[in-house]
Image (spheres, coloured by chain):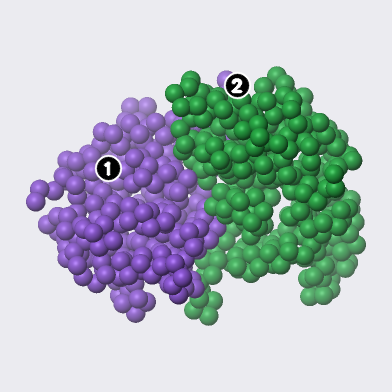
Chain colours: A green, B purple
Amino acid sequence: MTEELRLWNDGAAKQALVEFITRVTEQGGPDFVPLPDRIAVFDNDGTLWAEQPMYVQGFFVLDRIKALAPRYPKWRETEPFASALKGDLTAVLAGGEAAIVELLMATHADMTTEEFEQLVADWIAMARHPRTGRLYTEMVYQPMLELLACLRANGFTVWIASAGGIEFMRPWTERVYSIPREQVIGSSIKTKYELRDGQPVLVRLPELNFIGDKAGKPVGIQQHIGRRPIAAFGNSDGDFEMLEWVTSGEGLRLGLFVHHDDSAREFAYDRASTVGKFDRGLAEAPGRGWIVASMKRDWKRVFAFETA
Amino acid sequence: MTEELRLWNDGAAKQALVEFITRVTEQGGPDFVPLPDRIAVFDNDGTLWAEQPMYVQGFFVLDRIKALAPRYPKWRETEPFASALKGDLTAVLAGGEAAIVELLMATHADMTTEEFEQLVADWIAMARHPRTGRLYTEMVYQPMLELLACLRANGFTVWIASAGGIEFMRPWTERVYSIPREQVIGSSIKTKYELRDGQPVLVRLPELNFIGDKAGKPVGIQQHIGRRPIAAFGNSDGDFEMLEWVTSGEGLRLGLFVHHDDSAREFAYDRASTVGKFDRGLAEAPGRGWIVASMKRDWKRVFAFETA
C-alpha cells in the first residue's frame, strides 16, 4: 500500500492513511469494516481539484453570462450582470449571496437537464485555468487520484460531497476521477418533469432545491448514501460538519484536510481566504484527531503536467 | 436465462424479459449496453411487495399513532388522529392529503435519523399483514426477487424508485431485496444537522422535502442516479411517468407493469382501486410497447410461503 501511495511523501499524513486502510481491511482484526460500510466521501473544490483564484463553476457562470449577454442587452446596465460581464468579481461578490443566486439562476435554469449537461460538457472540454492555461480537468491533484484508486482497490466506495452543483460535476467526474454519476452529491436546483413535443424532459427551474455546503453536507450524504461514511476528506471550513459527522461514528474513522500551503506549485491560502476559507478546521483538527495534509510537505507532485 | 426465471410461466412477459436482457448484454450486438448504463428501476409497493389492503407504511403510521397516543390525550378528540386510533381508514382518507401529511409528520418527524431507523427496524421485524398473518417482509413477490437476481447476474444495477419513504425502506431493502441503501429513492422529509450533547445528529423535521410519486419519480431518479435507466418496473399509474421517461430514451428500453389480477393468491385490483390505481397505464401500455405481466397467468408462485 505504501507503494500505491507513492506520490505521498513519508510523514504523518501518509502514515495515518496507510494505517487506517490497513486496519479497516484486516479480516478478523478489531477495526475490520465490511465492504458495504467502506465508504469515503470527498469534497471536490480544493480537495480534488484547484479552487483558486475562484471556484471553477464560477468561471463557468461568467462565461455563460458572456455567451448569453447578446440576448439580454439590459444586463450591461443591471447588477450583478454588468459587473460579471466586466469580469469584476469583487463587485459581483459585493452583492452577496443574492447576487450569486441571481447569476446562477440566469445560467443554470430554464433548460432541460440534457441541455445543461451538454453546455457543461462543451465548456469543460475547452475552458482553461487563468493562471496555468491548463484545462480545468488537468487541475486535479495527482496524490488524491492515487488515494481514490488506493481506497477503491481496498474495497471502498468513493463519493463526492460538494457544495458545487451536482449536475455541473456529473458530466466529467467519471472520466476524471473514475467516480460515476450516481456517487456524486452536490447542490441542486429544482427540476420539473414535462412533455415537450411529446417527448418527456426534465426542466431545470430557477429555484434552489438543496445547498450541499457546511451542515448541508451530512444532510446530502444521508439523503444519497443512507449510511455514515467512515472516512471524509476536505480542505475548508465548508467541510467541517462533514468531517465531524463522519468521524463521530462508532469504530475507526478518518478525517483529513488538505492544507493549501504551496504557493510555488499551487496556491497558499487558509484563514483569510474568501474562497476555501480554512480557519476553524485548521484550529480544531489536532484536538479532533483529524489529519492536516500539507500540500507542500506531503505531496511529491501536485499536477500531472508539472515538470520534475 | 430461461432457467433463471423459472417462477415465470412461458408467455409474452417472460419472453420480453429474456429477449431484452439477451439483447442489451450481447457483446458486439446492435443493442448492447455497457455496464454503467445497465440500470433498472423498480417501484416498491405493489411491484416488489403487496400494497393491499393498504400501503405497508400506512400500517406503520397507524401503529405509531397508537403507540404515541398516551402522550397526546387530545388525539382522541382531534381528526385525523381520532379516526386513525379507531383504525377507521375511510374517515382518515376523507381528510385528504392534508390529513395524511399530518399523520406522517406526527409519526415520522421530531426524532433523529437513527431513532427513526430503529423504530422502523423494530416494527418491520414484528408487524404482520392483516390477511395472511405473515411478516410484511414475507409479502414480497418471488418472481420479482428472481428477476432482480437475474438482472444483477447480467450486470444490471437495480434501484428502487418508490413514492414510499426513503428512510422507511432503507432499514430492510438490503436484507429483503439485496438492494443496498444507496440504491433506494423515495419520498422524504427535511433533515437538519445539529449537535446534541456534543454529538452530531440529523434531526427529522416536520416538513416535506420530496414526493417521489408520478412526475416526481423521474425527478428523483435524475437526482440520485444522474442517468436515465434502461428498464422500469411498476404496477400503477403512479409509475406511469417513470415508465414514460425510461422507455423514451434512445436504444432498447423495457417498461413492465405488474397487473394485480389474482384474487386467489394475492389481490385483484386495477382501475377502480384507491391504493395502486392502474387505469391509464393499463389502457396505454399496449400502444407504448409496455408489457403488462399478469400475476395470475405469468407467475408460477407469488409468495415464498405458498403451499403448492
Q: Amino acid at mark 2?
A: Gly
Using the rendered view, name the quadrant where residue B236 is placed. Answer: bottom left
Which mark sits nearer the N-terminus, 2 or 1? 1
Decide: is B282 above or below B212: below
Instruction: State which quadrant residue B47 falls in.
Output: bottom left
Above/below status of B154 relative to A149: below
Which residue is found at the position 47% from the left and 45% from the top?
B182
Can you give x and y, in whole percent of width and height, for residue A234 in the image? 69, 37
Mark 2 nearby-residue class (10 Å; few <14, some 14–19, many ≥20): few
On screen, residue A27 versus residue A55, left or right, reads left
Image depth: mark 2 or mark 1 in front: 1
Q: Where is residue B170, by image quadrant?
A: top left
Q: Would residue B33 be seen by someone viewing this image from the given angle?
A: yes
Q: Which residue is mark 2?
A: B198
Q: Which residue is mark 1?
A: B137
| Chain identity of mark 1 | B
Q: B8 or A55: which is nearer to us?
A: B8
Q: Are marks 2 and 1 on the same chain?
A: yes
Q: Which type of secondary structure does the marked residue at label 1 adopt? A: helix
Residue at 55% from the left image edge and 58% from the top image edge: B226
Q: Residues within 10 Å of mark 1 (few under 14, many from 20)?
A: many
Instruction: Work out whether residue B202 or residue A227 is closer to the camera in this orientation and state it.
Output: A227
- In 3D space, how far apart are the residues under numbered discs 2 and 1 (Cα atoms)? 37 Å
The residue at the point 24 percent across, 72 percent down is: B12
- Per the image, label 2 sits on a secondary structure element best described as loop
Query: Residue B78 placed where, x, y %?
Result: 35, 39
Q: Chain of mark 2?
A: B
The amino acid sitting under disc 1 is Thr
Q: Residue furthest left?
A: B308
